[in-house]
Each structure stands twice: as structure tokens, then as C-alpha cells.
Image (tube, rainbow, N blue to C red):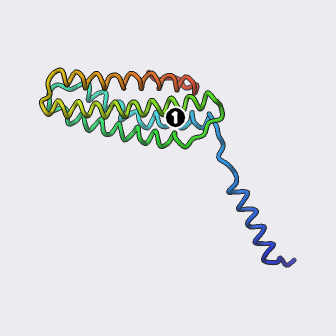
Amino acid sequence: MKFKVPFVFALLLAMVGLVAAAPAQASDAQLRKVVKQQEKKSEPATKKFVEVAESIEDPSDLEEVQQASEELRSALATYRKAVTPVKTSSSKGKQGKTKLLSALKEMTTGLTQFESFIDKAQGGASKSELESARKKFQKHLDKSEKLGDEALELLGIESAS
């Protein structure tokens, strides 16, 4: 049996079209999987930041804290990049994803505020300036934690906190 070139070409196009047209599956289960993976991946940076931040004893410790903060911000950026493209299949999944992305943004903003706090402390800022910067950081941290817990609940993932 001999095929004509246009027939083979049309067959190839149809096969490529079928493969290319297969959409990515929108799934809350896929989002849960990605979130769990990213939680595990970001955990070391989170633990390091908390340990270093809690052990500050003098201004020389601030550089180590700033480095840990930068590492955590990088881990959060990776987390956000992994979650953003995942499509959801339910309204709860969509709400959970939205809250999760907001939580990551709040935490990143909080870390930026924390780094500002460190810069002010190293620059000899007044006590009131330092307290103001600390409060801003705490506000973002609290909001991030609340949004994150709500997101995990909507997605049906147990919170580690």
C-alpha cells in the first residue's frame, strides 16, 4: 500500500494536534501535591531563619540573620513559581490557591520589612524606629500565617503549625 505525501502529512498533523490539544488537567489534588512538595522544600530555609532570628545576641549576628532571610525569600519565590501555574478544579481549590499566594506575598513583604529592620539596626536607628520596623514585620508575619492556615484548610492539608 502506497500513501500519498498529503495523506501522511495530514495524518501527522492530526496526531500532533491531538497531542498538543490535550489540556493540562485542572486538579485540586495536583495543587495539594505541589503545596506539600514546596512545604518540604522550603522547610530547611524556614527553620534556619527562625533559629538564627531567635538567637540574635548582638549586632554582629545581624548579617547571619539577613542571609537567612534572603535564603527564605528565595525559597518562597520558588514556592510561588511552583504554585502559580497549577490550575484548580473547584471553587475551594481556587480560594485556597489565592489565599496561599497571598500568604506567600505577605511573608515575602514581611521579610523585606525584616531586612529593613536589620539595616536600621545596623545604621544606629532610634529605639522607636526599630520598634516601628519590628511591628511592620510582625503584622505581615501574622497576616501571612492566618492566610496560610486558611489556604491549607481550604485545600484539605493539615497545618504543621
Residue with the most extreme right position: 1
According to the picture, the residue beneath numbered tag 1 turns out to be: 35
Q: Find residue 106 and report its horizontal and vertical position in percent.
A: 40, 30
- Image quadrant in which you'd find residue 137: top left
Q: How many callouts does the rendering have?
A: 1
Q: Quadrant of the C terminus?
A: top left
Looking at numbered disc 1 in the image, what kind of residue is underneath it? Val
Q: Is residue 74 above or below residue 144?
A: below
Q: Is residue 97 left or right of residue 124?
A: right
88 vs 12: above or below = above
- Residue 117 picture quarter: top left
Quick one: 116 or 78, which is closer to the camera? Answer: 116
Q: Quadrant of the N terminus?
A: bottom right
Residue 112: percent from the left, percent from the top? 31, 34
**29 relative to 136, above or below:** below
**Residue drawn where x is 53% and y is 38% of the image:** 34
